[in-house]
Amino acid sequence: MAKLKYYYDKESLSFRPVKSIWYSGISGVVLFLLSTILFGVLALFILLNTETLNTPKELLQAREIENLKFQYELLNKKLENIEEVMANVVDRDNNLYRVYFEASPIPDEMRKMGFGGVNRYNELEGYDNSKLIINTTKRLEVLTKQVVVQSRSLEELESIAKNKEDLLMSMPSIQPIHKNDLKRMASGFGYRRDPFTKKRRFHQGMDFTAPRGTPVYASGDGVIGRADNRASGYGKHVRIDHGFGYVSLYAHLSKYNVKRRQKVKRGEIIGYVGSTGRSVGPHLHYEIFKDGKRVNPLNYYSGNLTAEEFDIMLNLASQENQSMD
């Protein structure tokens, strides 16, 4: 039997039983259920949007993100070391190697060219760690660019070094007769007295007196351009094309030891001293051409002379005496 509920009636000053209505109880239950559901949905929404409650998959993803962030930070520290090494390589390249080989330094703008202006990293923006990712990506791309430029620079320097080596071997840099005969140097480059006219004229080479048949040596690597007696005044003579704009000439020979288009090496015998052509006695007339112009051969004797031997030749060459041709 259901319990009766009473309420106090002030008018009659007595307790009266409460009349229960069935639908009022149902409405209470419905209201309770709705409020419970609403509260549950709100609580679930709050929990899903905070770190208080995460699914196992979300927890795994969070750990992976933290691990990737840690790896990016390690990568950036390694990039700092690589950037220091690259900066050292760039400094040596510009201020040592390229200076030594007389090559222009590569501007820093060229080494990092192509990384300014337009935003290249739009697709990496909008994430929690976008700044870290963009910074790492940019540093990697700059380093990649620097490595490419440096690689090309080293290839250029290798080519320059090879040309320098060829130039040093080809340049006419030794005297054309044995250095034991240096004191036989009779006339140098410059104004001298002509042995035939006795007038002062410009002597365009150097004369070395030596017995007929004394060996004459190539002063540098090259190819025989001429070996004939068809040039006025030179008699039997040899011309060597050394490349790089250099040509050497050996005149008044008694005979040849080479022929046209033959390759020769520095120090190789190319002929023998004589007195053919316009000559007053057995001697070698030696000339050097640079880019088609005659230059003083004395400036190119750097191959195997000591300082004392060079001084002897310098003193003899500076005397304004009579030439031999």
Image (cartoon, grey):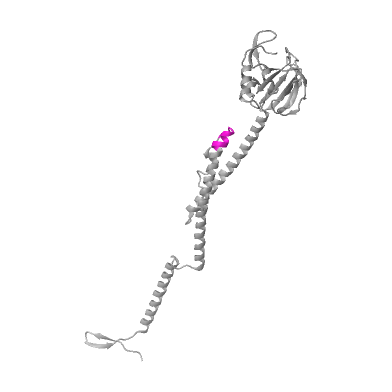
Identify the residue at image location x=40%, y=77%: 33
Measuring from the top left, give residue 244's x and y in whole percent.
Answer: 66, 28
Q: Is residue 205 left or right of residue 36?
A: right
Identify the residue at image location x=61%, y=23%: 308
Identify the image quadrant of the C terminus. Answer: top right
Q: Quadrant of residue 298?
A: top right
* Magenta-colored segment: predominant secondary structure: helix
Q: Is residue 276 left or right of residue 291?
A: right
Question: Is residue 192 rendered magenta in the image?
Answer: no
Identify the residue at image location x=41%, y=70%: 43
Seen in the picture, residue 34 relative to 49 is either above or below; the reply is below
Measuring from the top left, give residue 1's x and y in whole percent.
Answer: 36, 92
| Nearer-the-camera pick, 175 or 67 | 175
Measuring from the top left, give residue 245's x and y in whole percent.
Answer: 66, 26
Seen in the picture, residue 18 relative to 70 is either above or below; the reply is below
Question: Is residue 103 rendered magenta in the image?
Answer: yes
Measuring from the top left, give residue 180's x and y in whole percent.
Answer: 69, 22
| Nearer-the-camera pick, 53 or 97 | 97
Seen in the picture, residue 178 relative to 56 is either above or below; the reply is above
In the image, the segment drawn in magenta is 94-104
